[in-house]
Image (cartoon, rainbow, N blue to C red):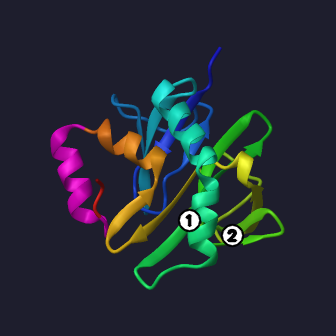
């Protein structure tokens, strides 16, 4: 049986959860006071799995930019899976740096289902274990493969609202 998986669709707070906890509306969105909403995506969703594979396959591109950013590049972030028993929540870390072959950064949002970390905790992840990476270059999103899947699956009016509220463009 596949676990439920959730994705938070906000800039620098895209999060994935395995497990079915939380109050969901009919569209599978978990609403949390003071936190971004989290949207349900099946654990075996082929588009999301392909996005994660693409992020891992291109991690060296991210590392090069992270280690020698141009003045037009900012907001570097990596998403990683956080495990707590059977629960897995994929969370963004930022700021992020690459040390001794691992990404090191700070949890950027409050977890929904895992209790092994909290916002502000420093964590590490190997590049072959990441879920995604992203940065902004001259106002455009680079990477953000899981974010693109979520955005592309939004109804047109919600996609326009998302595009209006984030500080980057998605090509």
**How far across and down, in percent of the image, does residue 28 sit?**
40, 32
- Which numbered circle lies on residue 119? none
Query: What's drawn in magenta, residue-wise?
Result: 155-168
Please report the residue visible at 28 percent of the width from the left and 53 percent of the height from the top: 171
Disc 2 and disc 1 in contact, CB within 8 angstroms: yes
Q: Quadrant of the N terminus?
A: top right
Q: Residue furthest right?
A: 100
Please report the residue visible at 22 percent of the width from the left and 37 percent of the height from the top: 155
**How far across and down, in percent of the image, does residue 83 sit?**
75, 44
Horizontal side of residue 65 vs 125, given as left or right: left
Mark 1 closeness class: few <14, some 14–19, many ≥20 residues within 10 Å: many
Query: Taking the image as drawn, is residue 32 in sight?
Result: no
Q: Residue furthest bottom?
A: 71
Front-most of residues 72 and 87: 72
Q: Which residue is mark 1?
A: 77
Q: Secondary structure at mark 2?
A: strand
Q: Mark 2 or mark 1: which comes first in sequence?
A: 1
Q: Which residue is mark 2?
A: 105
**How far across and down, in percent of the image, does residue 138 sit?**
34, 74
């Amino acid at each position: 049986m596949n676990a439920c998986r959730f994705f938070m669709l906000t800039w620098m707070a895209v999060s994935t959860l395995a497990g079915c906890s939380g109050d969901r509306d009919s569209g599978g969105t978990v609403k949390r006071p003071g936190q971004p909403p989290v949207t349900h995506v099946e654990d075996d969703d082929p588009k999301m799995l392909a996005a994660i594979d693409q992020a891992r396959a291109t991690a060296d591109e991210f590392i090069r930019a992270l280690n020698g950013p141009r003045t037009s590049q900012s907001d570097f972030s990596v998403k990683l899976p956080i495990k707590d028993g059977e629960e897995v929540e994929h969370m963004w870390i930022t700021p992020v740096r690459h040390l001794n072959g691992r990404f090191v950064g700070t949890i950027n949002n409050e977890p929904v289902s895992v209790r092994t970390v909290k916002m502000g905790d420093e964590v590490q992840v190997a590049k072959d274990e990441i879920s995604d990476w992203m940065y902004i270059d001259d106002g455009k999103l680079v990477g953000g493969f899981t974010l693109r899947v979520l955005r592309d699956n939004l109804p047109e009016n919600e996609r326009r609202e998302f595009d209006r509220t984030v500080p980057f463009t998605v090509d």
